[in-house]
Amino acid sequence: MKADAGVRIVYLGNPLHGDDAAGIRALALSQALSWPAGVELVDGGTGGVSLLPLFQHCRRIILVDALLSPGHEGEIRYQCNVQADSLAGSEGLEHGGGVKGLLALVPLLVSPAPIIDIFVIGGHRFTPCSPELSDEVSRALPELCRRLHRYVTEELMPSDTERPTGGTPQSVMGSRLRITGCVQGVGFRPFVYRLATELGLSGVVGNIGAGVDIRLAADAAGVARFCQRLRADCPAHARIESIAAEPFSFASVPHGFSVTDSQAEGQGARFPPDLAVCPRCLAELADPDNRRHGYPFINCTDCGPRYSIVNTLPWDRANTAMADFPLCAACRQEYTDPTNRRFHAEPVACAECGPRIWLQDAEGRVQEGPTAALLVQCRSWLKQDRVLALKGIGGFQLACDAGSATAIASLRRRKHRPAKPFAVMMQDLAQAEIYFELNNAELELLASPAAPILLLPKARLRLPVQGVVPEALAPGMACIGVMLAGSPLHWLLLNEVGGPLVMTSGNTAGEPICIDNHHALSALAPLADGFLLHDRPILHRCDDSVQAWLAGRPRMIRRARGDVPAPIVLPAGLDGAVLALGADLKNSLCLTGGGQAVLSAHIGDLANPACLDTLAQQVDSLPALLDLAPRAIAVDMHPDYVSSRLGARLAKARGLPLIRVQHHHAHLVSCLVENGQPPDEPVLGIVLDGLGVGDDGSLWGGEFLLADYSGYRRLARLRPFPLLGGDQANRQPWRNLLAQLAQSLPSGSAQVTALVAVQPALSCLTGARAQALLKMAGHFPQTSSTGRLFDAVAALLGVAPSELSFEGEAAMTLEALAEGAQANGCYPFGLSRQGELWQLDPAPLWPVMIEALLAGQDKAVLAANFHLSLVRGLCALVRQLRRQQGVSFTTVALSGGVMQNRLILEPLSEALDAMGLTVLTQSQAPSNDGGIALGQAAIALAKRTTDV
């Protein structure tokens, strides 16, 4: 051992213990390399406290060891400036007294203590009396030595010409910055490299499990200047949450600035959702002189797949679906060129080294060849009114000609989707503006990196309409969903076709979208006439996000591709890891940790076993990806929700607390969370939705709750009525009309008889079945559901089908009917006290509406009047509550699926604001059941603040 060494590398291992010999074998390989003066290589044997003398008279120690790591054999990791507590959970780092124990003793027994780094290689075969390494470790060992050599020679030690003469290198003090936030997968390391180079700073940057690690050889003023620019100029898709600085000692002045290999140190790193193709990549895609001309997987640090292809963090190519696509020489040159925008762009590829596309027809014949020729064939199919299944970013989609009623009808027939709207995809903003009059906010949303489906009013279609068939796309609806081509493959297809395409989820009815080629070829065979396939794996299923512009803000209808896994910041005081499993309809789950909440992509309705399987997979995969271990599980209070039963099984199996949360309280708190409302400040919540079980066992759905995060008090409700036929009433609107009329009109009412005479479709109100249902009314569950009230009005006005084909259909057709008219009157709602609860009663409006209908008034005007009447009734109830003794509030939060109705949300928000109340609404999470898991998680945290 040298008396004084700048860097001492200690190789640990047992040569007769299988993969445990990796450190000793690395010593032999390292000795064949040329090392700078001041570097010493030492055989540390099996370690233990006997190594303590090696830690003396040395500025930096590097330990090289094997790590027991099943499933990650051959994986190389290193940590810089480690301490004993930073190795928590590193079970394989045990030799003799153990590395962790050794590191705990160093600061106690060695002064001054050296800086300690660790290089480890994952192994799995630690067999006694076995001198052989596993194949995975043997193959990876030379790379470990190369990385170690590069780290020492390029980052720790200066070149010979830069070394002070006459001695070992002198240590240099600097700073270590740990950056948290969305700083992986956004070009952050290349940005740091360019910034440091511009400022003349030396050091190194790399991804770590907790975010990004930067080490700067600079004084305090230089570091401050760097941090100021870091925040001011950070990449467009990056979000810096915190910058933690601490002193750092370099063994010598680093040579320039470099990007180093990633480390698995820490947890909680954020990375962006999938990003729509950027303008610069589109320009290259369309440029015949560019080497990526027409390449359907072009991307850079500003765009391309992220969440859909990540396997684990840190964000490196080896940890993504691109791991099996080695870079060609040209792509590697770009990847390693700090001046290139593809510098460390992990999904970067080209036609020489990247994914490829091919076609398969309904008979199973495969067609390969140039991209342009394959797209010509796709155009031919689509112009023949055929349905094309294509593999997109987060899953498969089904496409057909948006201008062909025949093609759209065929797709509806095959998908068993008679009325639910289809979205349409446009090539770009220029094409979208050909069809729609768009405002600036809509233009910005459509062209955003999320590239969502945006609901646009049919009323703003430019006439004459050619190239789309509005009523075939969204029959009876007020809006059409429009999105722009979000990937280069979509852009090339739209460019070839020359017009808009229907673009809908690639799944059979009610199931999650397909993500695997083999599964899609089987599951979608009855739906598609041809398949456009590629070989880049999709690791995370992610349907298209849906948004609407309502009440001056974007509103999330379905949170998925482009928005997941972007976190929602939790208010101060809500710390801990909780897994919330959401509701059974529009299911998504939520995971919290580090003061943030991540909602999963939309999963679907859990009555479908495939959707339940997807939820069960997400329960494991999302915590693993985010490296968070839940300490409690939250579920809906409903005892029969399959999500609640799954949560109960998980909690029991994992020994975790199970927290049951009331449905409407969760809706309300989801709104409070994204508005940053403090957890202990009560607000009035108005929650209007379909239904959810209440704490009294009945089915709620029109609720006024005085609540904070940890509890609520029910102040008022919509007057309950029986769900005639139980769950059938959720699918057959006429049953709800029958129940409402029974509470409003006397039996055998002449008004009902006259109504049936002019509207024969309502004969179900007077037949024997209706009488039998009314006699059994006391045996059916009672509900205060606002959604079922909308169903009843839609049935009265003849715009509801006898049986719904999708959830919310009747309410959406009623809203669409009302959008085309101006309200000219207001129907009465009753207001009464029932025990401790105030009650908003729709009974008085029915005879007035029926009389207007019999008088021949325009149904659209009646629909508009109903919406206005409900808003005024809600406001009257709020005024009554403000007068109630013992009730005090200055803020009102609006949530529930009904708050996605423009004719309710906008006038209600305006009216409450005019009363001097602060109004909270939702944008980041859906106000429907798709956002309920966020509220469940926050409530669970609030209830378990002390121990979660």
Image: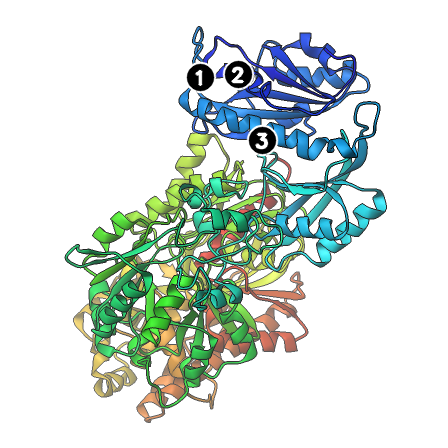
Residue 133 circle label: 1
C-alpha gap between disc 3 and disc 2: 15 Å
Tally of numbered tags: 3
Q: Nearer the viewer, residue 842 or 75?
A: 75
* Residue kind at label 1, given as amino acid type: Leu
Estimate the x, y position of residue 542 in percent, counting from the top left.
41, 54
The residue that appears at 72% across and 15% down in the rendered structure is 105
| Quadrant where the C terminus is found in the figure | top right
In the structure shown, which secondary structural element does the residue marked by tag 2 occupy? helix
Q: Residues within 10 Å of mark 2 (few under 14, many from 20)?
A: many
Left/right of residue 70 with respect to residue 102 in the rendered view: left
Q: What residue type is labelled 2?
A: Arg
Q: Can residue 35 be seen in this view?
A: yes
Colour theme:
rainbow
Spot the residue most to the left: 363
Q: Residue at x 48, y 62 (%)?
A: 276
Q: Secondary structure under badge 1? A: loop
Task: Check if mark 2's residue and mark 1's residue have beta carbons within 8 Å.
Answer: yes
The percent position of residue 138, horizontal first and vertical second, equals: 45, 22
Q: Which residue type carries mark 3?
A: Arg
Q: In which quarter of the image is residue 41?
A: top right
**Nearest the camera: 455 or 269?**
269
The outermost residue toward the front is 161
Q: Do the residues labelled 3 and 2 touch (CB within 8 Å)?
A: no
Q: How far apart are marks 1 and 3 (CA)?
A: 20 Å
Q: Mark 3 points at which residue?
A: 147
SS under mark 3: helix
Q: 10 Å neighbourhood of mark 3: few (<14), some, or many (≥20)?
A: some
Closest to the camera, between mark 2 and mark 1, is 2
